[in-house]
Amino acid sequence: MIDFQVERKRDPVRVRVSGDLTFGTVEELREKLLKTMPRKGTFRLVLTDIGEFDLPGVQLLYSLCRSGESGTVTIEIDPGEAAPRIEKMLRFAGLAPISCIQS
Amino acid sequence: MSIHADPLETFREEAKEQLVVLEESLLALEEDPADQEMIAAAFRSLHTIKGSGGMFDLGSLVHFAHVVESVFDLMRNGTLHVESRIISLGLQARDHLLALLEHGDDPELQSEGALLEQAFLAYLPEKGDGAASPAAGQSAEAQSERTWRILFRPKPILFRHGANPLLLIREMEELGTILVLGFSDGIPELSSIDPTECYLAWEVLLTTTADEQAIRDVFMFVEDDADLEISLVDEVADSDLPYKRLGEILLERGDITAEALEQSVNERAFLGQTLVEKGFVSSERVHAALEEQRYVRSMRESRQTAESSNAIRVGTDKLSSLVNLVGEFVSMHANVVFTAQQKDDRDFIAVGEQMDRLIRELRDLSIEMHMVPVSGLFNGYRRLVRDLASNLGKEVRLITEGSETELDKNVIDLLKDPLMHIVRNSVDHGIETPEIRTGAGKSPTGTLKLAASYAGAHVVIRVSDDGAGMNVERIRAKAIERGVLSAESDRSEEEILQYIFAPGFSTAEQTTAVSGRGVGMDVVQRNIEQLGGSVRIASRTGEGSTVTIRIPLTLAIVEGLLARVDRNWYLVNLSYIEECLDFDTMDHENRRGYASYRGGIVPFVDMRRYFRIKGTAEKNGGQQLIVVSVDDKRVGLVVDEIQDTYQSVIKSLGRIYEKVEGISGAIMLGNGTPALVLDVDRLVRLAAREKGHE
């Protein structure tokens, strides 16, 4: 289970997720993100409360950013306190930084 | 199996399947303990269980499977023989693994497992004494460090099967030093992604002493869920070479096509930037290729630093002096033995034989110290080819093969100029301009290949191009015009091509600043023959030419068979000799010079007649036939007597012998008598040519 909280519905739309970002939750999270994401403007995802995450979870974050690159919506991911853990995993897996994650 | 099944449950099911395989393999081994396939199958099952278990943090199961697997690894490598007790233990281990899978790590199972583990550990060498590590085992045959490129492209199903690439990376880390390059460019945007599928891919550069099989073992349990390519990208012998260029790496990895590279190279801008701008490849792939370059270079630097701390620098002049002195010493020893044999002094013969082994070791070691890889030589031509091609408006790609082949440093020094001449000729006259090549249906970029390989006590260097090739008819006409070939001659195309080595011979219609004045190929041949080598050319019009140089590994010492004709002694290099036969008992036809040989015939050269030695073969016969071969040509040399093998330093001959074909030098025997060293290469060719035109 993943807890999905829409903190702000108007531009910039702001969503906070908590719980695990793993193989078991990525499908659910994707559905919720697609439903919540505006057609234009800014969409901000806050990850500060996430628990465990794995490669399928990281892959979903890349996918979210990619959606912003080709559309009219600007995607921003605020990793919050999860930033060092995400960075560590990306470095270990040899993956490039996720472009829309804010430092 | 349900696609969305719990990965841990999926693992349990698959592990149980592996345990079935393990049990079947063990039972089959009981029937036939020598069945290598079954040993490998048992090992694979255990390794798969261990690897998959590691993804779910099943510590006890992983540890136990590792211990059992280590014993089976010893059997797989032939270090340990299959015996009935191991099979019994294996079956108990199988039951224990099943219990661990079904009941987890309960205390009762722990004590049972500990006892079994002890039984298996008794078969393993002590830690530090070659015991297998928890990572996939390294080969028992330790190799020097090499760098491998591992391309790991998971299939979409990978995550659903519970596999975790991060654990594979961790396992590779245990094998050596790694650089991990992940690729996320295959991930689609949110509306198109199935987040349970894997869109990631990896390239891992692993520097390790482990062999390819040990690396493959890491991926054993995901082999059906991923494409795996493992290639060697760097080894010790390559240390002095510049690493591959960006375009080469991208091409090798399949990131770009040759066409894309060609289109982008011509832009004269930064290649990586151009490729990305044209949409041929993602910036992530270019970044990864640049990282690979940086990694391999830094590994080479570290290796060179480590090597230099284990070495001392000695001037090449001192090394050359040492090699020469050893050569003289070897000659002196041969003289002692020769003299002792002549005088039939058994004490001296015995001492000489005892010294022989030590002297051979000393000789080999001193020669080895003076050997260097041809990579330095080959590398020196990169710039030459690049600049020449640029000046001539041509596109030429230089590729090298066998750069690790080693040659005496003196030979390499003496080979530089002749080889440069051949390379220049290839670029200038061989490879065509891009326009002509395109018109002929070829790639606009020509290829020049420098390849080296060992052939007995010789090294063969081939310079080949895919250019226009040579016009045999023009060479024939030129040879007739210069009076070196009669108009009626029916020499083969191959023989006619060799006229380009005649002095002042050039068929180039235009001389250029680079080549084509007919000065050079004769000098090339002379220089190579002075090295005791030979040079040949082969060519096909429109397809290209290949110049083949054959040179001895070292100039320092020659080992040959001593043969006598009348009162003259000759040395035949051992590396050419196939066998020696009693000529008198063989069917032979003296007038035509053929002898029956192994169900066929072999042409022979009567050395007495060849060197115009007066008199006839000795009464009571005893004539011997030394069968020598060069490439695919075989010839017999008829001599009066064969003595023992003889090692010596070759002395060059004076001008008097310069024009005598079939002699490449001389040695001095123990009693002060000179022996001529036969130029077997030349003799074989001369004989083959004569017989071919009878």
Image: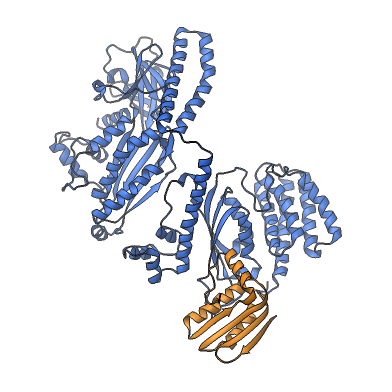
Chain colours: A orange, B blue
B3 and B415: which is toward the camera:
B415
Question: Going 64% across and 53% down the picture, which residue do you hit?
Answer: B136
Picture quarter with the C terminus of chain B: top left
Q: Position of residue B294 (x, y in %)?
A: 47, 57
Which of the 4 quarters of the picture holds residue B676? top left
The answer to whether any part of residue B598 appears in the image is: no
Question: Going 73% across and 51% down the picture, which residue do you hit?
Answer: B67
Q: Position of residue A24 (x, y in %)?
A: 67, 76
B570 and B635: which is toward the camera:
B570
The answer to whether any part of residue B314 appears in the image is: yes
Q: Position of residue B201 (x, y in %)?
A: 54, 66
Residue B99, placed above or below residue B336: below
Give the side of residue B203 with respect to residue B39, left or right: left
Of all residues shown, which one is farthest toward the right? B108
Give the side of residue A97 with respect to residue A29, left or right: left
Give the side of residue B89 with respect to residue A16, left or right: right
Q: Position of residue B532 (x, y in %)?
A: 34, 30
Give the side of residue B505 with respect to residue B461, left or right: left
Residue B569, placed above or below residue B129: above
Picture quarter with the N terminus of chain B: bottom right
Tell how many labels: 0
B431 and B369: which is toward the camera:
B369
Residue B581, placed above or below residue B39: above
Which of the 4 quarters of the picture holds residue B525? top left
Question: Going 62% across and 64% down the picture, which residue do you hit?
Answer: B166
